[in-house]
Amino acid sequence: MEQGKQGVMVAKLMPQQQNPIEQLQARFKELEAGFRTWLAKQSLPVEAAVVTATSAAQGAAIGGFMGTLTNDVSSSMPTPPPQAASLNPQAMASFKQAQALAGGPLVQARNFAVMTGVNAGISCVMKRLRGKEDVQSSMVAAFGSGATFSLVSGMGGPNLAANAVTSGLFFALVQGGLFQLGKKFSQPPTEDIFYSKTRSMLNNLGLQNYEKNFKKGLLTDTTLPLLTDSALRDVKIPPGPRLLILDHIQRDPEIKDYRRGSGR
């Protein structure tokens, strides 16, 4: 009996081992939240440069992978004779478009890096300058991405400027349509309308797991400018996330404008 009791006591005293995958996910979220907080404190040129570089790296990795799938297609394309350009410019333009869309890993890595990097960089600048992310900002970023992609990939005919503008407009229209379509189908339930700004803030900080804490405490969007450390502590949010949330509220121009609009 005594040995059984001792075994139970030892089992109680031994700390429970956490799942290593959960530990890795929690660590990644902490690093991501810390990186976002550091990035928000930087100047606009630094933030734009970092966002552009990281997004371009991600795009290059995706493009390189996609290029391995289309490598056989690009290698099987015949090389046109030099006199073909003077005989049929339109055919040469179509051939260049096919090459740009079906290039090897390096070509696709370059194309995707340009598209994602420029898009993310312009989106970052527009959001910092305008204080919000809407369809106009999205379309401006898409126009820059499409125009740059056209210039780098060599798509279209010999008139580079016209092709860049055309590609930019096409990208902007597609992005604007997708933005509006996604906004239409991602409307939150009626009871979540009062937590839209809160949800966006928590997602940007990597703290979306604490949305339920806000709802339990009825901390709606209208209370964001009034939040204090004690209010967040009452809804059982740990110290680290509390500091990130309060720092974000102090720096977010949209919340400041909301406070002024409410007459506070």
Image (cartoon, rainbow, N blue to C red):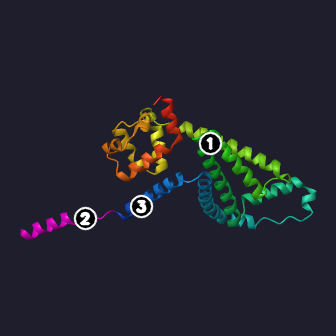
Residue 84 picture location, percent across and down: 90, 61
**Does residue 17 belong to the magenta stretch?**
yes
Q: For mark 2, does the 10 Å Cα neighbourhood hold few (<14), some (14 to 19), or many (20 or more) residues?
A: few
Give the Cα separation between the discs numbered 1 and 3: 33 Å
> Which marked residue is nearer to the observer: mark 1 or mark 3?
3
Judge whether 69 appears above or below 43 on screen: below
Mark earlier in primary sequence (1, 2): 2
Residue at image coords 41%, 33%: 191
What range of the chain is rendered magenta?
A: 1-18
Whether label 2 touches label 3, CB < 8 Å: no
Q: Position of residue 62 (x, y in %)?
A: 61, 60
Q: Main secondary structure of the magenta part?
A: helix
For label 2, the SS is loop
Residue 178 - label: 1
Label 3 sits on a secondary structure element that is helix
Mark 2 lies on residue: 15
Q: Earlier in the sequence, mark 2 or mark 3?
A: 2
